[in-house]
Image (cartoon, rainbow, N blue to C red):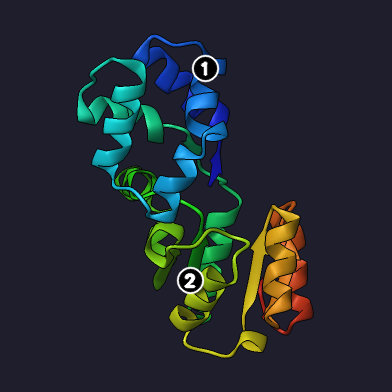
Amino acid sequence: MYFSHQKMCSNIATLFGLSEDDTRKLLIDSGLQWQIERGDISEQQFQQQLEEQTGTRVAEQELKLAAADIFRLNESIEPLLAELKDLGLRLVLLSNTSVTHLNFIQERFSVLSYFDAFTTSFAARALKPEMPIYQHALHNAQCAAHECFYTDDIKPYVQAARGLGIHAELYTETDLTRQQLRQLGVPVRL
């Protein structure tokens, strides 16, 4: 999935009648977004804090939509996930995300159906690149670190996974990921 924090800020700015800059300060710079993604606060607490800080009340569903309607499917990855499942491999999602975002994706996209387990920051109570989220993912993977492959488009997250002995590569495009998997002996199509 591709996502845009800028779009989230724009959506929420419109909902609350704020500027995008003020909304970014309120969500990102303050750390409020990371609190909900870490599971430190609930969706209700997130909404309450926004309403208190802006003096504006909004409908719960409108806020959830504004916060989560920021995703776009990476269409090239879905065939690879299907191929990996057909090979009998266990797939585990590892994501910094909130329950709001995960629910939105599950309701609107089929891509998560390929995964056997989810390791989310809100459930693990840790954000990448913190070690506990990777350890949680390894537990969900049900195998040793050296038997896992992980890809991410953020270099420090890849480096953290490598620090645990996970085969990890920087994601830039799906065709390159296919090549990386083949180098590890996974017989995916090129």
Which residue corresponds to the image point at 26% horizontal and 32% vertical from the top-left? Answer: 48
Other residues around mark 1 within 10 Å, as few (<14) / some (14–19) / many (≥20): few
Q: Kindly identify the residue that appears in the image at 67 percent across and 87 percent down.
A: 146
Res 34 label: none
Give the residue at mark 1: 22
Q: Nearer the viewer, residue 93 or 100?
A: 100
**Looking at the picture, how far across and down is residue 142, in whole percent?**
47, 87
Q: CA distance from mark 2 to mark 1?
A: 36 Å
Please identify, in this view, whether the residue under mark 2 or under mark 1 is nearer the observer: 1
- Picture residue at 47% right of the left edge, 75% below the top: 136
Residue drawn at 34 percent across, 43 percent down: 104
Circle 2 SS class: strand
Residue 13 picture quarter = top left
Is 111 situated left or right of 50 in this image? Answer: right
Tell me the element at label 1.
helix
Q: Is residue 181 visible?
A: no
Give the side of residue 94 with respect to residue 169, left or right: left
Q: Quadrant of the C terminus?
A: bottom right
Indicate the amino acid at tag 1. Answer: Asp
**Residue 174 spot, x, y in % from top left:** 69, 56
Q: Residue type at mark 2: give it.
A: Val
The part of the image, by quadrant, that contains residue 183 is bottom right
The percent position of residue 66, horizontal first and vertical second, equals: 37, 27
- Is residue 57 visible from the viewing direction of this image? yes
Left or right? Give the position of 64 relative to 88. left
The numbered mark, 2 or 1, whose residue comes first in the sequence reads 1
Q: Which label belongs to residue 92?
A: 2
Residue 98 vs 15, above or below: the answer is below
Q: Relative to 149, is 39 above or below? A: above
User: Is the residue under label 1 in contact with that under label 2 (CB below 8 Å)?
Assistant: no
**Looking at the picture, does residue 39 appear above or below residue 85?**
above
Circle 2 crowding by C-alpha within 10 Å: few under 14, some 14–19, many from 20: many
